[in-house]
Amino acid sequence: MWPLQVVLAYAYPVYFAKKTDKDSIDGRKADVYTFDSANASAASNCAMGTMGMGNSTSGKGTVWIDQQTGTMLKLDMTYTNNVADNNQKVIGTGNGAITIELTKVNQVTVTSPVN
């Protein structure tokens, strides 16, 4: 799992993202999807809580998906979370942003040092 729950933040919009365009990232053809939790169904917003993102109150952004591999090439997202104390009592809200871009897909070899 990546820090800042990036994996979950990316997974949640799958339920309501809309394909809006095509683009190229680092020479790779990508489908572009936009998402906004304000447009999500009640069931999708319920799923957000069950996926471990119960502190998120809203999120929107754009994600680029490689047409050949289905890999996320880029994510640009803003979100609002509830901030809780150690007793899980909500004490405020905070805004955040995530930007991720993957490059050199299928151009780099990674070797594990463990045999």
Image (spheres, rainbow, N blue to C red):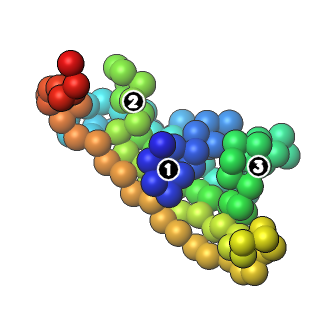
Specify the amino acid type for callout 1: Val
Query: In the displayed structure, would residue 47 be above or below residue 38?
Result: above
Residue at the far right in the pictured view: 42
Specify the amino acid type for callout 3: Gly
Q: Are marks 3 and 2 in contact (CB under 8 Å)?
A: no
- For the point 45% across and 54% down, the residue is 3
Query: In the displayed structure, would residue 4 be above or below residue 103?
Result: below
- For the point 72% across and 72% down, the residue is 86
Q: Are marks 2 and 1 in contact (CB under 8 Å)?
A: no
Q: Position of residue 92 (x, y in %)?
A: 72, 80
C-alpha span from label 2 to label 1: 14 Å
Residue 111 left/right relative to 82: left
- For label 1, the SS is helix
Residue at the far bottom in the pictured view: 91
Residue 96 left/right relative to 108: right
Q: Position of residue 2 (x, y in %)?
A: 44, 47
Q: Which residue is mark 3?
A: 49
Q: Disc 3 or 2, which lies upstream in sequence?
A: 3
Q: Which residue is mark 2?
A: 71
- For the point 68% across and 36% down, the residue is 15
Viewer-nearest of labels 2 and 1? 1
